[in-house]
Image (cartoon, grey):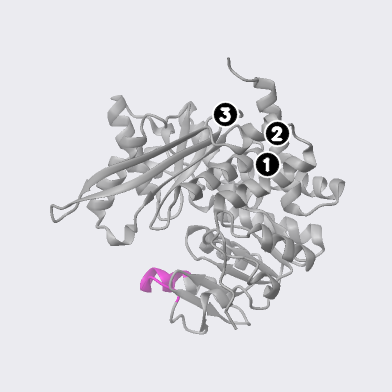
């Protein structure tokens, strides 16, 4: 008997399908659907980078702006060997809805370079970053499109982009990117913002669903910046983190993993593998272990029609972008498993990026406790709005979030009209 192979996932097709479902429910006109389905601008760049040994390698990068009717485009830049134009299109569209669902005045954008940065030296990475920043400099800017960190990029990469852009302008332009180091206009609380937002949304979802957060068994896929901060904050809130995974594998302990110990271990060893007091498990199998809350915090397309029937969580909180396919969504909904979508759950990062942008523009900075209070207020308010829409429309969390977000972008698009 032939083994059923997983279908190749097209992230942009997934993003459009999610939009179409909300557009149907909102009875959007065909004109608005056509406008909101298509990215406004797509830039593909092919550029040379000189390697440390003198060779020249060619790289391909992208910057996609999906919609700017509510404000400047906003979205991260990822360096990954699997980056594709369709992936960047999807991520840009998701950013549009994400900014709208938390009601901050940005549109959606995303960028990426096809590269495995782990194979580059620091100087090669800097040259690649600066050349890519030069190639996209014509479409980014503090009033037009503000990049931020994403997969395999960090504050140092943002510093190189900010410096490169500033060199072209002849003066410092800190507001051109967010997620920068504090020394050049970064914001307090930005590094922890996405994970903090995920933990707030997980807490609010538990309240709404009558689940107890303290003692809840949690599985987190991905132990990078977002996953590790989420794990730390939920551990502090009394959750039992029973499984963690990173790019090298996964670990499991049904009695709970000591997250501070795991954080120190990863700092020293570079991976979770071998952490004392936890058993190694297959990374994909870790998603299917018994738990109360499952938090995919890695890449898109992790929960599919193949593994959704075996997911044992009561609640999925999407810390990654697009981790659940539309087919998996339907299966999880049918099985009574609640899914809090990425456009709400991981919006803490873009929310504090907005704070950073505002601080850079006004040259006045807030203390970390003020940042965290403002973030808590926006995430709590946004979850409450989605919860109210869910109850009003008798739908799941994803549809409720999309109904709010798409309606807001559609209204802005209608009000502005079509030029000329």
Circle nearer the N terminus (1, 2): 1
Asked whether residue 233 is drawn in magenta, I would say no
Q: Secondary structure at mark 1?
A: helix
Q: Residues within 10 Å of mark 1 (few under 14, many from 20)?
A: many
- Segment colored magenta: 263-272
Q: Residue at x 67, y 41 (%)?
A: 101
Image quadrant holding the N terminus, namely bottom right
- CA distance separating discs 2 and 3: 12 Å
Front residue of 325 and 101: 325
Residue that numbered label 2 is attached to: 408
Q: Is residue 199 left or right of residue 181?
A: right
* Residue 99, picture quadrant: top right
Image quadrant holding the C terminus, namely top right
- Horizontal and vertical percent for residue 7? 57, 64
What's the magenta bit mostly, secondary-structure-wise?
helix
Residue that numbered label 1 is attached to: 101
Residue that numbered label 3 is attached to: 71
Q: Residue at x 39, y 40 (%)?
A: 44
- CA distance separating discs 3 and 1: 14 Å
CB under 8 Å between callouts 1 and 2? yes
């Amino acid at each position: 008997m032939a083994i059923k192979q997983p279908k190749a996932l097209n992230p942009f097709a997934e993003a459009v399908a999610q939009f179409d479902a909300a557009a149907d429910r909102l009875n959007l006109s065909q004109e608005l659907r056509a406008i909101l389905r298509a990215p406004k601008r797509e830039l593909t760049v092919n550029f040379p980078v000189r390697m440390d040994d003198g060779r020249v390698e060619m790289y391909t990068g992208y910057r996609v702006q999906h919609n700017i009717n509510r404000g400047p485009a906003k979205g991260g830049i990822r360096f990954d060997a699997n980056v594709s134009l369709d992936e960047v299109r999807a991520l840009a569209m998701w950013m549009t809805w994400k900014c709208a669902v938390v009601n901050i005045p940005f549109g959606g954008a995303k960028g990426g370079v096809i590269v495995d940065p782990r194979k580059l030296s620091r100087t090669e990475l800097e040259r690649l970053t600066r050349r890519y920043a030069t190639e996209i400099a014509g479409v980014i800017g503090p009033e037009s499109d503000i990049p931020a960190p994403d997969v395999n990029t960090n504050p140092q990469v943002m510093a190189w982009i900010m410096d490169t852009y500033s060199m072209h302008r002849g003066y410092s332009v800190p507001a051109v990117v967010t997620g920068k180091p504090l020394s050049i206009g970064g914001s307090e609380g930005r590094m922890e913002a996405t994970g903090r937002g995920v933990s707030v949304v997980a807490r609010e979802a538990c309240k709404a669903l009558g689940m107890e957060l303290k003692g809840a068994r949690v599985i987190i896929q991905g132990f990078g910046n977002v996953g590790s901060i989420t794990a730390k904050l939920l551990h502090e809130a009394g959750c039992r983190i029973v499984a963690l995974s990173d790019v090298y594998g996964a670990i499991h302990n049904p009695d709970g993993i000591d997250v501070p110990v795991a954080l120190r271990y990863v700092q020293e060893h570079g991976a979770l593998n071998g952490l004392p007091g936890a058993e190694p498990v297959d990374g994909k199998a870790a998603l299917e272990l018994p738990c109360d809350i499952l938090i995919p915090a890695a890449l898109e397309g992790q929960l599919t029609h193949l593994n959704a029937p075996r997911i044992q969580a009561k609640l999925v909180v999407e810390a990654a972008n697009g981790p659940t396919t539309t087919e998996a969504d339907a299966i999880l909904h049918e099985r009574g498993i609640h899914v809090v979508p990425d456009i709400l759950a991981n919006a803490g990062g873009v929310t504090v990026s907005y704070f950073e942008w505002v601080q850079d523009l006004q040259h006045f900075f807030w203390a970390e406790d003020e940042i965290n209070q403002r973030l808590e207020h926006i995430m709590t308010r946004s979850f409450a709005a989605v919860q109210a829409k869910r109850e009003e429309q008798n739908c799941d969390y994803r549809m409720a979030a999309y109904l709010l977000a798409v309606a807001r972008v559609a209204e802005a698009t209608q009000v502005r009209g079509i030029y000329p």
